[in-house]
Amino acid sequence: MARIFIIGVTGGIGHRLAPLLLANGHQVTGLHRKPEQADNLKNAGITPVTGDLMELTAETLAPLIRGHDIVVFSSGAAGSGLDRTTRIDGDGPGHVLAAMKQEGISRLYLVSAFPEAGRGKEPNPRFEHYMTEKKRADADVAVSDTDWVILRPGTLLHEDQDGQVNAGLAIPYGTVKRGNVAQFLAELIDTPEIRREIIEITDGRMPVAEAVSRFVRK
Ligand SMILES: NC(=O)c1ccc[n+]([C@@H]2O[C@H](COP(=O)([O-])OP(=O)(O)OC[C@H]3O[C@@H](n4cnc5c(N)ncnc54)[C@H](OP(=O)(O)O)[C@@H]3O)[C@@H](O)[C@H]2O)c1
């Protein structure tokens, strides 16, 4: 049993991940920014903690994540503005890393973005900024001394899992059900020997458990 802190617990991936972790016997805490989300989280068996990444710093995050074993970062500004993208997608994981260091927490799972996202579309400065900030966060995490895994999903679909994915260090671009990303994350969390990996994921034809097991280095 691990104590897991999800940042982005009310999001498309996060709200699908939490019940999978609870079913696997873990304790789940979720960061939420709107007071009215607390009751729903409690009713789902998740401990709610209020906080807004636009305001949180390493110092104020540290007491919130205290006592947890694992942090999952699946939050994002979702196109709500350049400054929000900088602070949430770009700065957020760095603040989390600093807070984890302060609290002696070593395991971090970061939901990032697939490098080929948006290719073939008209160049869009807001999207370019988003991709730059995602990469900046990846770089902060990858250079840290935590036991991190960075997951880079293709374009996310609003669908629950069918448990069939394609995952690899470098795979062709595609779409992926948010439920499949959540299931993959839950399986990764129960396979702690997989660490310091950047994994690309789309929907595919391989059962999630098998796809995850392929990342266990012999
Ligand atoms: N869209 C795509 O195709 C795509 C592709 C690859 C990767 N991604 C990345 O995948 C991740 C998860 O995506 P998703 O679709 O599950 O996300 P989502 O549904 O947009 O959810 C975002 C989560 O972040 C939270 N959040 C937003 N601003 C916040 C703030 N200031 N403080 C605290 N929490 C805040 C949201 O809380 P509220 O409930 O309060 O809004 C929500 O829980 C994101 O990092 C996204 O960039 C997206």
Image (tube, helix red, strand yellow):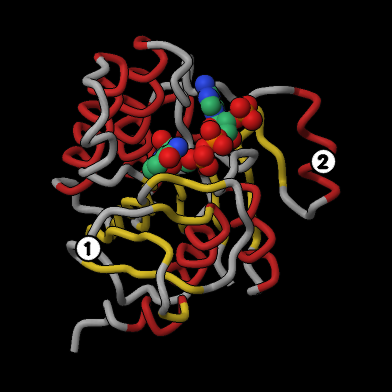
Mark 1 lies on a secondary structure that is: loop
At horizontal 63% and vertical 74% (from top left) the residue drawn is: 24
Q: Earlier in the sequence, mark 2 or mark 1?
A: 2
Q: Amino acid at mark 2?
A: Asn
3D distance between C-alphas at marks 2 and 1: 37 Å
**Residue labelled with disc 2:** 40
Q: Residue at x 26, y 17 (%)?
A: 124
Amino acid at the residue labelled 1: Ile
Q: Please name the residue shown 45% across and 55% down the image.
A: 176
Front in this rendered view, residue 77 or 18? 77
- Secondary structure beneath disc 2? helix
- Check the image and name the residue furthest to the bottom: 218
When the figure is inspected, residue 199 is found, relative to residue 93, above or below; the finding is below
Percent across and percent down for residue 150 are: 30, 53
Q: Is 72 above or below relative to 198? A: above
Nearer the camera: disc 2 or disc 1? 1
Q: Quadrant of residue 173?
A: bottom left
Relative image position of residue 73 (x, y in whole percent): 44, 43
Packing grade of label 1 (10 A; few <14, some 14-19, many >=20) is some
Q: Residue at x 36, y 28 (%)?
A: 89
Q: Position of residue 213 (x, y in %)?
A: 35, 83
**Residue in the foreground of this view, choosing between 155 and 148:** 155
Residue 146 located left or right of residue 73:
left
Residue 8, given in percent of the width and then of the height, sits at 55, 38
Residue 178's place in the image compared with 191, above or below, is above
Residue wearing tag 1:
171
